Image (cartoon, helix red, strand yellow):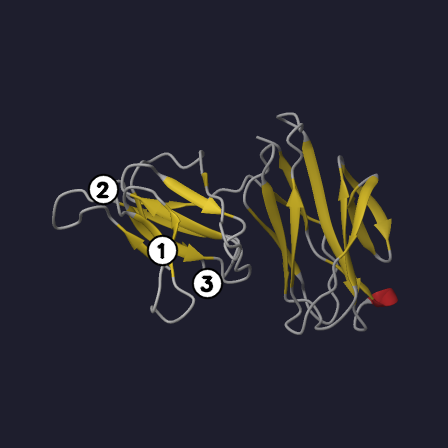
Amino acid sequence: LVGVWSGWGGAPNNRGGLYRTTDRSLSWQRLWPSDRVSSCTVDPLDHQFAFVTTETEGLWCTTNLQSPAPSFQPVTSFPFRQPERVFFAPHDPCEIWVTTFGNGVYRGDTGFVDLGGGKAGSTVSRLTACVQLSPGTSARYGVQRGVANTPGAMVFGLQQGAVPLFGGTLVPTPIVATVFAPLDATGACMLPFATPASALLGWNVFAQHWSVDPGATFQVAATNALGASVR
């Protein structure tokens, strides 16, 4: 992936945009015809997701980068027109840092609140979330530091509770949806969450991941819970 400015070093030539090669630069496909693209950063945990920076059009993103013709949407919450580079935080792949041309460094705020409620076992697993909840967009929940190759499930609710369960605390109550979400060989998983286009602003969503853990009481462990409002 290469970002190109139209006419850099000469007159505008209408060739700016984001380009991709799949044959080691023998040929190039123009994915997005923006006038001046400065950089592109791919999510290290989800190669379908990427951020693109521009000179005057702000910050953009795509959730289908691997498709033949990816679609790009503006990140309307970003407040400055000229971002330069996007970095995923090394300690949390759901936290991003954005440098700008003359307006400092920003840290992404997804709007999720850590509500605690985790239950440790052999490890202390952690739930994070990427991309704020907005009507018609896709957020992503990520689990880290769990037990490798074990079954698990993500539970969702519309209210925050504190129900005793397997020696831990179930926060999303009552449960309105349960999604099978097993942990991989690294003890992690990534789960997309599509916010309905009809979702009302202020609508609350609470989530928590539960998994099998031989080192936990009842052989069940839980992450912290997260809460967020559609905005």
Sequence-wise, the earlier of marks 2 and 3 is: 3
| Amino acid identity at mark 2 | Gly
Evaluate if marks 2 and 1 touch, with contact meaning CB atoms under 8 Å apart.
no
Q: Is residue 85 visible?
A: no
In the image: residue 119, left or right of residue 54: right
| Amino acid identity at mark 3 | Pro
Give the residue pinned by disc 1.
19
Instruction: Using the image, determine if residue 146 lies above or below residue 131.
Output: below
In the image: residue 118, left or right of residue 77: right
Give the residue pinned by disc 3.
90
Please identify, in this view, whether the residue under mark 3 or under mark 1 is nearer the observer: 1
Q: Which element is circle 1 on?
A: strand
Residue at x 77% of width, y 70% of height: 150
Sequence-wise, the earlier of marks 2 and 1 is: 1
Residue at x 35% of width, y 44% of height: 33
Please provide percent x and percent y for residue 173. 81, 40
Give the residue pinned by disc 2.
102
Q: Which element is circle 3 on?
A: loop
Within-10-Å neighbours for mark 3: few <14, some 14–19, many 20+: few
How far is mark 3 from mark 1, CA to CA? 27 Å
